[in-house]
Image (cartoon, helix red, strand yellow):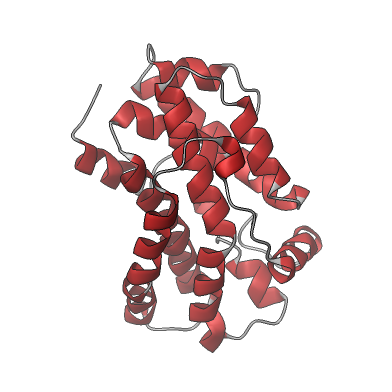
């Protein structure tokens, strides 16, 4: 099953996919519980695009390349884990990655993507998405854009449940993130090796994520 790449990218960016992504707020709920104010949400989006999302997009791009080259994805996963020091963040990503793997095995059962993911007991979300991008015919730029868009739209969708705001405002946040997303795409779309994955840090975001699992009032798992 090989849909047109543009159509496939729309499919894989749809938050309604049955992979468990609806449980994620892209760190928004932990941030709000940690003291972030609603007017600062656009700054959170921008910060994630410069840090967490850089790691995830680059990981997906490299995973796509290695899947097409019939190379194992274990080194990509290890590189991602080394750049994602929080076990809470890693656990949330793996929870969705398993759902992504199940989707890939259903849509492309006899593909290199399915075989590569089957060998991994717990693929992280960007590794699984990158492998699926290979099966769906996406190039590096489309893969990076997919991952970055997914992070921003997940956060904006979560904001509608967590904040008293006009839905048009969240839509505006998403649209205004476009230039930063495209800048990120240009930075990582050509990467091919696990060692090429950048390693920016976001200690405060990680601190908020660590406090989140024990909070008595939660709508999202991360």
Residue 207 or 63: which is nearer the viewer? 63
In the current view of this chain or complex, which residue is farthest to the left?
4
> Residue at point 78% right, 60% down?
210
Vertically, is 204 above or below 138?
A: below
Classify residue 123 as left or right of residue 141: right
Image quarter of residue 177: bottom left
Across and down, in percent, residue 175 comes to 31, 72
Q: Quadrant of residue 157?
A: bottom left
Q: Residue visible at 56% across and 20% down?
A: 72
Looking at the image, can residue 105 be seen?
no
Q: Residue at x 42, y 26 (%)?
A: 104
91 over 69 or under it: above or below = below
Could you tell whether 7 is left or right of 122 in the image? left
Report whether 82 appears left or right of 95. right
In the image, what residue occupies the spot 36% across and 82% down? 169
In the image, residue 164 above or below residue 76: below
Residue 120 visible in the current orientation: yes
> How far from the left and from the top, in percent, is residue 44?
56, 75
- Residue nearest the observer in this picture, 68 or 173: 68
Name the quadrant containing residue 108. Answer: top left
**Rendered location of residue 1, percent (x, y):** 25, 21
Classify 29 as above or below 129.
below
Q: Position of residue 52 (x, y in %)?
A: 59, 58
Image quarter (top left, top right, bottom left or bottom right) of the C terminus? bottom right
């Amino acid at each position: 099953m090989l849909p047109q790449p543009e159509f496939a990218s729309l499919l894989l960016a749809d938050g309604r996919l049955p992979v468990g992504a609806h449980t994620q707020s892209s760190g928004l709920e932990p941030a709000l519980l940690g003291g972030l104010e609603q007017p600062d949400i656009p700054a959170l989006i921008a910060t994630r695009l410069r840090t967490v999302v850089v790691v995830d997009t680059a990981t997906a791009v490299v995973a796509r390349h290695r899947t097409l080259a019939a190379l194992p994805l274990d080194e990509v996963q290890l590189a991602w884990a080394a750049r994602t020091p929080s076990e809470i963040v890693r656990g949330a990503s793996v929870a969705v990655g398993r759902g992504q793997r199940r989707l890939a095995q259903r849509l492309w059962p006899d593909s290199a993507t399915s075989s590569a993911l089957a060998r991994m007991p717990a693929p992280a979300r960007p590794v699984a998405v990158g492998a699926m991008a290979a099966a769906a015919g996406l190039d590096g730029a489309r893969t990076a854009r997919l991952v970055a868009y997914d992070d921003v739209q997940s956060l904006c969708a979560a904001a509608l449940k967590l904040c008293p705001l006009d839905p048009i405002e969240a839509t505006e946040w998403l649209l205004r993130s476009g230039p930063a997303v495209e800048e990120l795409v240009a930075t990582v779309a050509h990467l091919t090796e696990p060692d090429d994955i950048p390693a920016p840090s976001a200690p405060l975001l990680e601190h908020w994520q660590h406090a989140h699992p024990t909070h008595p009032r939660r709508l999202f798992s991360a």
